[in-house]
Image (cartoon, rainbow, N blue to C red):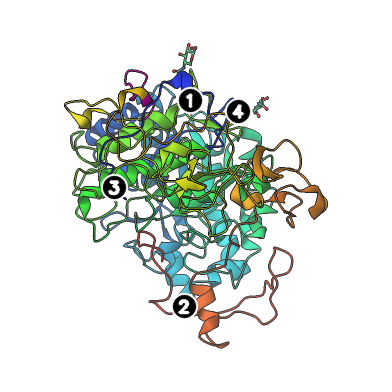
Amino acid sequence: MHFLNLLASLLSTAALTKYVAANLRITADHHSFGGVNYPGLQFLEPKERNNIIRSIVKTNARVVRLFIRAEEKHADPESEIGVFDRTILDQFDDTLAAIHRISKGKVKVIIAPHDAHSLRGSNNVPCDAYCNKVDGAFLDFYSNLDIRKLYKTRLDVFFRHYPSKNFGERSWSTLSEVILGVDVQNEPWSGIFPIVAGEPWLCDIANHLKEEIGLGEHNIAVISGGISGANTPDGTQNWPDSAMDCKAIDVIGIHGYYSNGKDETAGTPWAKMFIPGNTITARALGNKLLLVEEMAYVNTDAGLSYKKSAIWDQGNALNLRGIPWMYSHLTNKDEGTTAKVSITRSANFAIGALTDILRRAYTARSNFNWSKYLPAPPALSNLTLIPMNPFIPEQSDCTFGCPGFLCNGADGCATDLICKNSICQTPNEQQPGKVGDVCNSKAVCLAHLKCEDEVCQECMPRPSIASNDKRKITWAGDPNLQCVLDSTQPFLMRPLCQLPRDKSNPCQNAQHCNADEYCDWGLCKACTEGCLGMKCRSNNKCKTGFCNSFGRCDYPGKAQKPVGPGVRARARGPGWNAGPKNMERGPNKVRDETMRINIPVDGPKATGNPTS
Ligand SMILES: *[C@@H]1O[C@H](CO)[C@@H](O)[C@H](O)[C@H]1NC(C)=O
Ligand SMILES: *[C@@H]1O[C@H](CO)[C@@H](O)[C@H](O)[C@H]1NC(C)=O
């Protein structure tokens, strides 16, 4: 099946506009964006720091996420609880000023004012003053009200009391020209899911940032920071009800570490997670903004030669779905086999792929309105085709239309696959009209297949006109390239796949169609009422099948299942790290008294590891 090293079936852009949409393209006039994490940027020598900022600006990154925490050779500004080192805040302030000056105001900063990893000394972050205070019972940080008060003081000192050295002694809470948002913490409860203690901490701290410190009145976003650590592909760790229902949280920060694997690229989990109108995106729209605050390359047995393509695939999928993203993370040191991308290397290393996809993020569209926090770019991308990955290694066993690849239309996938929700996938067993299925005037084939001798026939993707250097072809739909015509192909084993123009796929129910279609008397049709993501009161008003508990028509796909250390803990038996009995979810239902819970050191997963 993976014989398709010929790149792509290419059609002129004009022809493609007539396609039956299979890609849920975002047409809203809002912008998305891309950015990078750069822990420790403030600790570099000013000259080097500025050179790096210059390089970041050139990548078209619009946001840099910085951490206030200790590093191996650098102290946390709160050396003892309640004792702050002003020189370290000055150093951070210098970095804010340098970013603002060098980018001419185009690049903004997200600040993680503390890192849950520093409560345990995990993930190479040293144990800090709070870590000493909780002494191994790290959930005390959330459930102990005295410690919460101390943490609020930390936030007050950073964002309200510290007079900015470079911005005329203003407090950081007013610097919306350079600060886009502030995390409540980096990865609160990291590795613990469901949250077993201190859940009200979340909205309490968010309120404190927004109202008391005043980020809200200055249009600086309060961000949830990656609750419980990295989100699993089918999981809901990062958006518990306590975050979604908390008014003070403006942005849900999502962290995910996905690798390319069998039947998917590193971008496929993102493309599935954010189908427009699905449970999370419909629930968030108009209520919260969604931001992938951390995404990264994860090394696999396939090796480092896939690093570039894996980074690019993730950015591409998020650009398609209109969800802004930030790479985790940049460095000026060696990359090794890690996710790190060195900003100082030349463009044929990972930074080249990251820069390419950041440039595309710069003009990508979104269904979410970010303009309060980040001005729109001069122009948004036109609604052309999903670009193809130019960084797929030559030795890859598949370069076009494989399972998990993004597709523009039915002929963008290998012929035994179906392009559904812009992802090439194996059709469901019950999907009518597959290769080999019986067909007749009533039972039609999938739109790209021909019915001959009462059987849906296999076909061959339309090749592009041969180029001497096939690597030159880098994206589908390049208006400079041409595809072969039916009439110019005399010696084909199989017929060319048909243009699915004006043809719909057959179906038995909505699951056989794209998420923005419904099944109308055996054929998928564009949906206009009772569609995915639309408001509903009952199931019978939803053409997609059912009305979810958030009052939106939902896609009857695989249910999102809770996974993570908390769930495994329950599987081990009731005694282990299980939290209070009969605990219900939600900010008002969880007990809030002090609880000492010692988390086994090897229990929680560190960020940066594959999550499954
Ligand atoms: C986007 O948000 C901005 C600022 O909150 C607002 O002024 C603008 O009208 C919004 N745009 C749309 C199209 O809703
Ligand atoms: C989109 O199309 C318009 C009109 O054809 C053009 O002026 C504009 O530059 C295009 N935008 C981009 C980002 O390519």
Residue shown at 43% from the left, 28% from the top:
362
Marks 4 & 2, CB-CB < 8 Å contact: no
Task: Measure how far apart labels 1 and 3 are at the Cα level.
Answer: 24 Å
Q: Mark 2: which amino acid? A: Ile
**Residue identified by numbered label 1:** 16
Q: Which mark is residue 28?
A: 4
Could you tell me residue 445's position as x and y percent? 54, 44
Residue lying at the far front of the rendered structure:
453
Marks 4 & 3, CB-CB < 8 Å contact: no
Name which of mark 2 and mark 1 comes first in the sequence: 1
Could you tell me residue 528's position as x and y percent? 73, 35
How packed mark 1 is, by other alpha carbons closer than 10 Å (few <14, some 14-19, many 20 or more), is some
Mark 1 CB lies closer than 8 A to ligand 2: no
Q: Nearer the viewer, residue 282 or 228?
A: 282
- 556 falls in the magenta region: no
Q: Mark 3: which amino acid? A: Cys
